Amino acid sequence: MFKNYLKIAWRNLWKNKGYSALNIFGLAIGITCACLILLWVEDEVNYDSVFPKQDLIYIVPTNQTFEGEVYTFFSTPGPLARDLKNEIPEITKSSTTWGEEILLAEGNTGINRYGRYVHPDFLDIFSLNFLEGQKKTALSRPDGIVLTQETALALFGSDKNVLNQVIKINDEYSFTVTGVIEDLPRNVSFSYNWLLPFERFQLGEDDMSWIEEYGNNFADTFVELAPNSNFEVVDKKVRSMIASKMSNTDDSPNEAFLHSIKDWRLRSDFQDGKKVGGQITLVGSLAFIALIILLIACINFMNLSTARSGKRANEVGVRKVLGSSKRRLVSQFMVEAIILAAVSACLSVLLLMVLLPYFNILVEKQITLRPFEPIHIFSLLGITLLCSLLAGWYPALYLSSFRPAQVLKGANKSLGKATIIRKGLVVAQFAVSIVFIVCSIIIYQQIQHVRVRDVGYDKGNLLNVTVSGNMIDKFTPIREDLIASGTVEDVALTNTNMLSSGNNGSGLSWQGGVDTDDVLVRFRYVSPNFISTVGLELVEGHGFKNDRAVDSVNVIITQSFANLMGEGSAIGKTIARYDTNYNVIGVVKDYLYGDMYGNGKTGPVMFFNNFDYANTMYVNIKSESSRTEALASIGKILKKYNPAFPFEYRFENDLFNSRFRNEELVGELTKIFSILAIIISCLGLFGLAAYTAEQRRKEIGVRKVLGSSAFGIVNLLSKDFLRLVFLSIFVAIPLAWYTMQNWLQSFRYRIDIDLWVFIAAGTIAILIALFTISYQALKAAMMNPVKSLRTE
């Protein structure tokens, strides 16, 4: 029986190969889109799944309250990890960690790599796989270092035993390799290329007593819970830990809490101390868009299948007269749908092989197809079956419902109902396409709106260079040589990137301030010429002097801080921090940091003339200088004073633009999906136009004989379809407005939606539809009427 179904189905599909090809291509595009997004979703939801204890591993963030508002920070006091393990029985392992980039060198080979200072428990918490060395002893010696396999290969090559080899760190300290661990995959929330004992944190510093203070939040804390622990009970104990250790109050507004490894990637956005989502929003949005594209492809299938109903009505009538039941006819048509979906799926696999490398570039991943992996095989089969059911059920039920007496007389009333449904599906297709076009335009507008906003400093020619080696000690001659090169305006040091929220604290008091104790203040430690180098606007007072001794108790503040100091000028007023009174000598205009989509009301910032702990050098390149020449000159000078370290840099503008990666990804994918949705819709429209022209060929022949022009014929065939496109515009406009208005609500700094966006999207849809229809309309209009009428 099934074999006969296949023979008949294949014969019918081949007989109508033009329509079949349109169906296959449309479904293949939909399935390819769905598979690409599912591969991306799979990569996102599998973040950190490489760690076998993921049900037991937690990071410990802190909630801190300032002026009644709760802020969540992924940083904790140094002793917290130790005390959690010692005082909470359910916590079996814990580790404080802190990460930085250092220079690793072996012989003449030197590489900059990011890594972490950790406690020994870290190795067990994450079940790291040792290729060389022993996990139990790898971090037991203070001069031991653990390398990843990739880092070991970069330093020593592939033909050398790495264990017990000695390497140089920052061209100063010697460490012995005590272990080599397997490389982590790319889809982990945090990565590292080396591990050092936490005791070696801040190499070379004499006074490290501050890391034992509960008032200093600087490190990450990871814990592992015992199996079958009650999360709510343990979390409650963790939340009370910091308050119990703070000597100044029993009601500390700061609390630590447990955040599961399963949420690190997808649900790490917090508001008022509570989880409000994160990457999971993007995952859900793209999965929904992929489903919409798949539905459009299935609608395209239904459209083209029902369009051919007139041709197949006689076939159904004859088969029913000869004894075929409705059930057998439904089965026959469903087999045809399954064959089309299966061929489309095979084509989609070929498209995936071609498109996946480009998709990886777009989403900045290294996703592999893995076609023979069971979950991928079953997923593709599931999508294929879903498509065949979605696309085939209505045509099958519709075609099998024809009454033989009516269709054989040529009086089948249900054909009119099919026309109405077809028109509704065309409207739905184009409405979705128009919504995608509107979304693409508005997302692009929103990103550009933020990119061109005034951030309060000059980021256009600002070069961001990581501080390494003796750049701090040699800063004065480095700066002098860079300025003397003629390509550099000025150079400065800071402990915090301009875009970062950076160090912060509270407990300050100042003249003219009321209830200042819990105001959150950002601290910046900079070189004297920092303000002018980065282009901050000085609105009152003056900058720092080059004599650090003179400015040791002088500070510069932002306008938002000055406003907190009451009426009148802030210049000359004092700010008390710990046991020191600082004098305000300058006020700069507020600038944007932290949340790039913020409304511009940034918190108060306080600048100190102290660059001993700088980690970033800003180089302001002259606008008239060639960037290539400037970079060559800067690299040469830094190599002169810091020969062991490679010259690595980033432009501040590029760092700023990278903050919008998720929005750009949504925008790019929406743009691509809108194009694909239009292509699929146009495939259906093309097929329907061809069918309409074929059905009306005799009418067209008569009209031409009676004197109708080609333009009149084109207008005749086009106007019905264009009415549908106009209707789809009216359906799409409120949907698009509602969707994008909700999306924009998540940004405090946002655009207003303009009417021209909808006009532009509608115009694009009309032009594309007109172009699609015109080919078939012109073809019908130019046909010789004799050929159309010769059967009469």
Image (tube, rainbow, N blue to C red):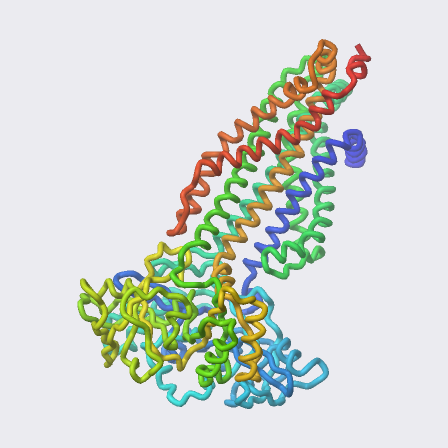
Q: Does the rendering let one see residue 784? A: yes
Residue 201 versus residue 637: which sits nearer the camera? 637
Please give left or right for residue 437 compared with residue 213 in the image. Answer: right
Residue 41 versus residue 342: which sits nearer the camera? 41
Please give left or right for residue 91 compared with residue 272 in the image. Answer: right
Please give left or right for residue 190 compared with residue 209 in the image. Answer: right
Q: Residue at x 49, y 85 (%)?
A: 470
Q: Is residue 212 above or below residue 673?
A: below
* Quarter of the view holding residue 419: top right
Q: Residue at x 65, y 55 (%)?
A: 358
Q: Quadrant of the C terminus?
A: top right
Location of residue 433 in the rendering, given as x and y in whole percent from the top left corner: 56, 37
Q: Does the rendering let one see residue 201? A: no
Location of residue 681 in the rendering, given as x and y in whole percent from the top left corner: 62, 35
Location of residue 271 in the rendering, given as x and y in whole percent from the top left corner: 36, 58
Q: Residue at x 42, y 87 (%)?
A: 205
Please give left or right for residue 674 compared with residue 350 in the image. Answer: left
Q: Residue at x 72, y 13 (%)?
A: 704
* Quarter of the view holding residue 160: bottom right
Q: Quadrant of the N terminus?
A: top right
